[in-house]
Amino acid sequence: MTIHSTDPFASPEQDRSPVRRLRGRLPSPVTLWTAPGPAGLTVSSALIADGDPGRVLGLIDDESQLWTAIEREGRFTVAPLRDSDRQLADRFAGLMPAPGGVFRSERSRDTDYGPVIEGLDTWAGCRLTGSRPYGWGLLIEGVIEHVEIGPEPDPLAHYRGRYHLLR
């Protein structure tokens, strides 16, 4: 067996998108978005804008169950994930098996905005205000109507295709 120092399945350098390579060099927050249904998705293309009212922006897959639920219900939650939530992030991203669905293996509490996974004590409840195609994704905009702030977590970031702990 040979151990490679690089990914043997990666696209050759000349075939890689320069935009995707640039995006990969920017650390992104790892968040969990949920909606009534229940539906959920790990989202790393997210931005919180302070203001009156505060707003949240995110890029998601327009064919995801999350988008179907958000579009139907008009509301959703956004929770930052911690270093200890790596497997949770992978399950909701569809990278790890979740027999019976992602919510079956996770305890959650219902809120007016959707389920919040037990232990995620920092989260925002949002109302959908708009969406439009944006690049390869769907840009979602919401007004933040409710915020709960828990203890300061060990935030999880995504950088160059891997999770990293920010300290």
Image (cartoon, rainbow, N blue to C red):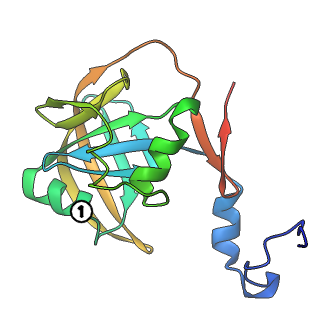
Farthest residue toward the top?
Answer: 151
Quarter-wise, where is residue 119 in the image? top left
| Residue located at (44% from left, 56% from top) | 93
Q: Quadrant of the N terminus?
A: bottom right
How far from the left and from the top, in percent, is residue 55?
Answer: 31, 38
How far from the left and from the top, in percent, is residue 104?
Answer: 26, 45
Quarter-wise, where is residue 8 in the image? bottom right
How far from the left and from the top, in percent, is residue 100?
Answer: 26, 55
| Residue located at (33% from left, 38% from top) | 78
Judging by the rendered image, the residue that carries numbered circle 1 is 65
Q: Is residue 40 visible?
A: yes
Q: Is residue 65 left or right of residue 121?
A: left
Residue type at mark 1: give it: Gln
Q: Is residue 30 visible?
A: no
Q: Is residue 27 left or right of residue 101?
A: right
| Residue located at (72% from left, 56% from top) | 25
Toward the viewer: 41 or 107? 107
Q: Residues within 10 Å of mark 1 (few under 14, many from 20)?
A: some
Q: Quadrant of the C terminus?
A: top right
How far from the left and from the top, in percent, is residue 53?
Answer: 24, 31
Toward the viewer: 23 or 88? 88
| Residue located at (66% from left, 58% from top) | 161
Quarter-wise, where is residue 54 in the image? top left
